[in-house]
Image: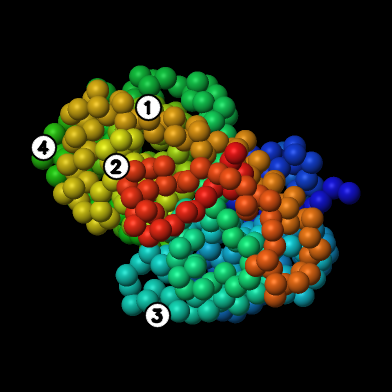
Amino acid sequence: MTAHVLCVGGEDHGLRIPFLLALRERGFHVSAAGSGDAGPFAQVGLPYFPFRFERFVNPFADWRAIGTLSRLLSELRPELVQSFDTKPNLLVPLAARKARSVRVVRTINGLGWIYSSRSLKALALSPVYRGLHKLASRSTTATLFQNRDDMRFFERYRLLGKSAKGLIPGSGIDVEKFERARRAGPSRAELRQVLGLGTREVVLTVTRLTRQKGIPTLLEAAALVHQARPGVHFLLVGPRQSEGPLAISQAEIDRHSAYVTALGPRSDIPALLGVADAFAFPTEYREGVPRALLEAALAGLPIVTTRMPGCSDVIEDGWSGFLVPPRSPRELAQRIIDLLRERQEAAAMSSRAAQWVRQEFGLKLTVKRYAEVYEDLLAYPAQEGLSERDGLNLTSFQRAAIQLGALADPAERDEREGDGLRILGTQ
């Protein structure tokens, strides 16, 4: 019998369509549920079930979402449900408490606003969310992580319960599709002409335009770069108006309009990457593995990003790009200038980053890793021996693998902490 996998995510769930299609090609019956547009799923023939939930804290809306998911699980009766994103990772296990026939797998792709913000509200909500994760772990079969920092966080606060755990870096990027999109788009010269960039040096950032994503820091750094190198222009690509109270204001951007342009959300990211000379990703957010960094690396752009979880799994400081502390505009500005000034060194670093992404973050390898975990879990009766699940001898969780700490700085930290985290599904 073909196992039914229901994959649940948020408003950006459409970005996982290549992952879901690849799972289907491996023999799974795949369906999806999320809060985003159903159109892209219909176009590729994936069954999609929309449900609503609030991204921000709203207990009443969360309770309704749990009820909706519980009914959906009862109707579809999947053998396995996979959740991504902060809210679904809490809602799905809670909705599955009475679904005795389903195995629940959640992927922690970053810890979200509550564990990234330094606001009083976030500090107050942090213990509440830890309690909810402990509750959710009781009906979770396995928890997967995209970076080792998040895994250590869950272990430190004992948020895993008896669920199995493993490390699979990133959600997978379809390297061949990305490169086809780059070739099919307009040329660098054509797009530069459309955007009015001329021959100016361009620094590109692709992210949501929020404070947690480091945009205020980037704007300060842009002003410093402009003083030292007036010909540099910054392009910001990503949503702002949909980001609610976390968004930066248009007035903040306008103060830097001489050297910063906000393009809003775009669907031609592969082509836009081709117009840039460097990529800056100043996040203060606890990322999973940022897709923006993977795409920038594949495009051959030299990268400067922050020393934050997820980012440091893609970039090794001084080898495949630069890492700077978050909220450090002067250091960010200096590294941007370094990338633009030392073109030969920057090209060497970008080449290493591209090789690393192709080696460890490709979609085919990621799907293989997930499929092996699913197959192992499906070999066990759902919910059986829940209190003894830490004794499950899952082949995919025990298989010898390379250490993610192949990156220099994290490897040194791993050695100090005596840790031996391994990536699932790598021989």
Q: Quick check: 180 above or below 154?
A: above
Query: Mark 3 or 1 closer to N-term?
Result: 3
Kindly report the distance in space between the C-alpha atoms of the residues bearing marks 4 and 1: 27 Å
| Amino acid under disc 3 | Ala
Tag 4 residue? 228
Query: Element at badge 1?
Result: helix
User: Given this view, does label 2 or label 3 mark the residue nearer the observer?
Assistant: 2
Decide which of 2, 164 is in the foreground and name it: 164
Residue for point 13% across, 34% down: 229
Residue for point 27% across, 29% down: 346
State the image coordinates of residue 81 (x, y, percent, origin top left): 71, 59
- Answer whether residue 417 is visible to the viewer in this image: yes
Query: Mark 2 or 3 closer to N-term?
Result: 3
Q: Are marks 4 and 3 in contact (CB under 8 Å)?
A: no
Counting labels gives 4
| Amino acid under disc 1 | Ser
State the image coordinates of residue 123 (x, y, percent, origin top left): 37, 76
Query: Mark 4 or 3 closer to N-term?
Result: 3
Query: Element at badge 4?
Result: helix
State the image coordinates of residue 282 (x, y, percent, origin top left): 31, 49
Tag 1 residue? 351
Residue 20 falls left or right of residue 108: right
Tag 3 residue? 124
Tag 2 residue? 317
Residue for point 28% across, 46% down: 323
Q: Are marks 4 and 1 in contact (CB under 8 Å)?
A: no
